[in-house]
Image (cartoon, rainbow, N blue to C red):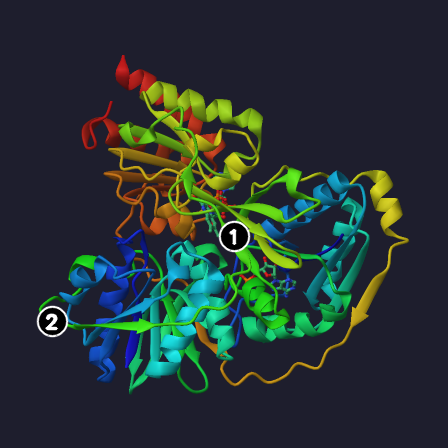
Amino acid sequence: MILVFIEHKDCVLNKTSLEAITAAQGIGKDLGLKISAVIPCDKDCALAQEISNYDLEKVIMAKNEKLGIYTPDGYTDAWEQVIKATNPTYVIMAHTYQVRDFAPKLAARFGKEVVGDCIRYRNEDGKLVFTRRIFLGKLDADVIIEGDAPYFVTFQSGAFRGDNAEKGGSANIETMDVEVGEIRMKPEAPFQEAKASIDLTKSAIIVAVGRGIKSQENIEKAQELADALGADLAASRPICDAEWLPIDRQIGSSGQTVAPKVYIALGISGAIQHIVGMKNAGTIIAINKDAEAPIFDIADYGIVGDIFDAMPVLVEEIKKAKS
Amino acid sequence: MKIIVLMKQVANKDAVLRVGNDEKWIDESDIAHQTNESDGYALEEALRMKEAKGEGEVVVCTLGGQSAKTVIKDALARGADRGIHIIVENDQKLSPHQIAKTIADAIRDENADLIFTGLQSDDASYGQTGVILAELLGIPHATIVIDIDRESLNGNLRVKRELESGWYQWFVYQLPALLTIQSGISQIRYASLKGIMAAKRKEIKEVTPTIEDFGAAQQIQKVYMPLKTKQTQMLGDGDVKRGAAELVEKLKTEIRVI
Ligand SMILES: Cc1cc2nc3c(=O)[nH]c(=O)nc-3n(C[C@H](O)[C@H](O)[C@H](O)COP(=O)(O)OP(=O)(O)OC[C@H]3O[C@@H](n4cnc5c(N)ncnc54)[C@H](O)[C@@H]3O)c2cc1C
Ligand SMILES: Nc1ncnc2c1ncn2[C@@H]1O[C@H](COP(=O)(O)O)[C@@H](O)[C@H]1O
């Protein structure tokens, strides 16, 4: 069988769990395995009913009073017992920050490791081959897992579509009272930082700079381009890490998620954590001196070359076109 | 307070990558290397904690071939007190569990109060070496740490974790603990001339481990350039200035934002 992790906060579903269900259903069909969903919670989880509508054999509510707020120790203990009780072949999860936090620990408890952040899989005569992106998206690696089950696999956000998860089941909801040992970390309540001073989600055009901009002084050149276009300036993480631009200009998994009409990426390589924040832009334009940069995979228009040659010409031509 | 910082040598971010002959990794010959990005932040945070506390020792540890010694030397020049070099050539052939196990065996007797790692390596990108190591050493961990409360340095350590889409959460830990550090936690210092001179006198312990087989390892079968999924219209045909002019034309007539 396959176990699939349902992530939630206060019984509100993390939508990427539906992507994990889709992945598990695909693998289940390929290998002829049944699927159970696992929801750790401190009470009769309000989500269980909703998840039981998917085509699954069972929904397992792993229940313990210590599972109300996520901790790696609590979740690992709970999962350990569910796995021991059910003997799954695969444990499938979405590669969220929470999963990154506890899945490797859980796998290690079983003397295993996680094949993490996969973007797809294929079935070769009953043996699954998983594909991971390595070198910040510049290369793909096909990976197999040696040894006996359970196999732990996580899939990248967007690798499967959550709305493709098949419904139609009326899965049994089963409560499993799990024991949780000492929790060695004390969580405080999650919070959001004070509101960003700029809301890039409303921008029509965004000019975003990456490490290719090279120095703080050069930010001005990108600002000129943004001004000429009537665009807002944004950045990849390293630019905000270096404090060349404030953090509320950061696009990506730990920054803002935007969908402007036009997104111009200047000297940005296109790592997944950046792409998840801007892939829904109407038109994506990338300028990068590396023709193999992963950003070109999602760009509608591309220019291979030096941004410092391109920026002044762009400013000049835009001004001409506008007058 | 003793802090061990794990630092890995990886291919330079701007290096042009070619698939190696066996198609199982990149061709490492002629590749420039650098210290993994988040590991640099992990070191900086360790140094700042030691400074804030006014006492302590920062020990850097790397597992890799001879060339990885540069990572340690650079860290010593920035202010780390000593280094441990676990010498393993072709370490890219090891799975994350093997790396964590080998490091665990090499540092267990150090009994560090804290172990810092980067949150992810920029080459293999397992994102799990630190977490497995914590489990093997039997200590608690926190991943994606973006702040450490200086007020808590003499008691239970209060650390801020980054969650997704702008959310954060503080957790309180008793030591020992392992933290995986996110980039941007603080601004990284440069090595001073004095630091570079002082580094020459600092100890680098070499360890030659026996690598245990690991039956549950993930194994790379093949690496290759990602398949293109989208038709990108390339402009300028190698001539950037012409490309820029063509782009403005598109912005005006097709995309219609000018
Ligand atoms: C948990 C986690 C969360 C993260 N969150 C985010 C996030 O929210 N947002 C984010 O952006 N990243 C995030 N990252 C980091 C991400 O993985 C990448 O490291 C980062 O996006 C890379 O930024 P970059 O493209 O600017 O730099 P690089 O990857 O170094 O790319 C620079 C690019 O510029 C090009 N270039 C250099 N010079 C020139 C020139 N003169 N002309 C043209 N091109 C040039 C190079 O060819 C290269 O492609 C996160 C990582 C992790 C692990
Ligand atoms: N060979 C190594 N030597 C030293 N530290 C390592 C090594 N491999 C991984 N690490 C540490 O573990 C972190 C996560 O790596 P990874 O699990 O490969 O993403 C890195 O940022 C390093 O701090």
Q: Is residue A241 above or below residue A75?
A: above
The quadrant of the image that shows the N terminus of chain A is: bottom left
Closer-to-camera residue (A322/A175)? A175
Residue at 37% from the left image edge and 19% from the top image edge: A227
SS of the residue under disc 1 = strand
Q: Which of pointers 2 and 1 indicates the residue nearer the eye?
A: 1
Residue at 55% from the left image edge and 68% from the top image edge: B132
- In the picture provided, is A154 more to the left or to the right than B49? left
Residue B145 visible in this rendered orientation of the protein:
yes
Q: Is residue A227 above or below residue A61?
A: above
In the rendered image, residue B169, in percent from the top left (x then y), is placed at: 47, 45
Is the CB–ligand 1 distance for label 2 below 8 Å?
no
Report the chain holding disc 1: A
Q: Earlier in the sequence, mark 2 or mark 1?
A: 2
In the rendered image, residue B91, in percent from the top left (x then y), is placed at: 63, 72
The quadrant of the image that shows the C terminus of chain A is: top left
Crowding at label 1, few (<14), some or many (≥20) Cα neighbours within 10 Å? few
Residue type indicated by callout 1: Lys
Report the chain holding disc 2: A
**Disc ID at residue B220:** none
Residue type indicated by callout 2: Gly
In the rendered image, residue B220, in percent from the top left (x then y), is placed at: 47, 75
- Find disc 2 in the rendering and name its residue: A169
SS of the residue under disc 2 = loop
- Find disc 1 in the rendering and name its residue: A186
The answer to which image quadrant residue A203 occupies is top left
Question: What is the spatial separation of the Cα atoms under label 2 and label 1, in whole angstroms?
Answer: 38 Å
Is the CB–ligand 1 distance for label 1 below 8 Å?
no
Q: Is residue A275 above or below residue B127?
A: above
Badge 2 and badge 1 both on one subunit: yes
Residue at 29% from the left image edge and 56% from the top image edge: A16
